[in-house]
Image: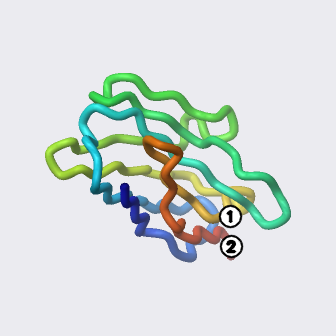
Amino acid sequence: VHLKESGGGLVQPGGSLRLSCAASGFSFSTNFMSWYRQAPGKERELVATISSDGGVTHYADSVKGRFATSRDNAKAMMYLQMNSLKPEDTAVYYCHGPYDSWGLGTQVTVSS
């Protein structure tokens, strides 16, 4: 299993970013996937989940209405669209897949 996140960066408050997670080494289209984040000095927290067909998603209360996750099973890709970003969204964002697999993460920094 291999997961690789991309798309992080520095953005001003109120801005947007789109994260991507490229998956390989397993049957992506039949697996539930998730996004997590970890801010400095804090525990890793669940941000969003998406069912295998993309039809069901769930979000942490802190991002509900601002973030949206999606997937393209034909490309074995998962996405996290992040809008109205806040400084408290600053963290390393990870995708999580089957067999407790993790990517290396991508840094998102929200600052003016």
Which numbered tag is attached to residue 90?
Answer: 1
Q: What residue occupies the far left of the structure in this picture?
A: 74
Q: How crowded is the residue under tag 1: few (<14 C-alpha within 10 Å), some, or many (20+)? A: many
At horizontal 67% and vertical 32% (from top left) the residue drawn is: 61
Q: Are marks 1 and 2 in contact (CB under 8 Å)?
A: yes
Q: How crowded is the residue under tag 2: few (<14 C-alpha within 10 Å), some, or many (20+)? A: some
Dot 2 falls on a residue whose secondary structure is loop
Q: Nearer the viewer, mark 1 or mark 2?
A: 1
Q: Amino acid at mark 2?
A: Ser
Q: For residue 105, what is the image quadrant?
A: bottom right
Residue 95 drawn above or below residue 10: above
Residue 94 in view, yes or no: yes
Mark nearer the N terminus (1 vs 2)? 1
* Residue under numbered circle 2: 111
At horizontal 53% and vertical 45% (from top left) the residue drawn is: 100
Q: Amino acid at mark 1?
A: Thr
At horizontal 28% and vertical 42% (from top left) the residue drawn is: 28
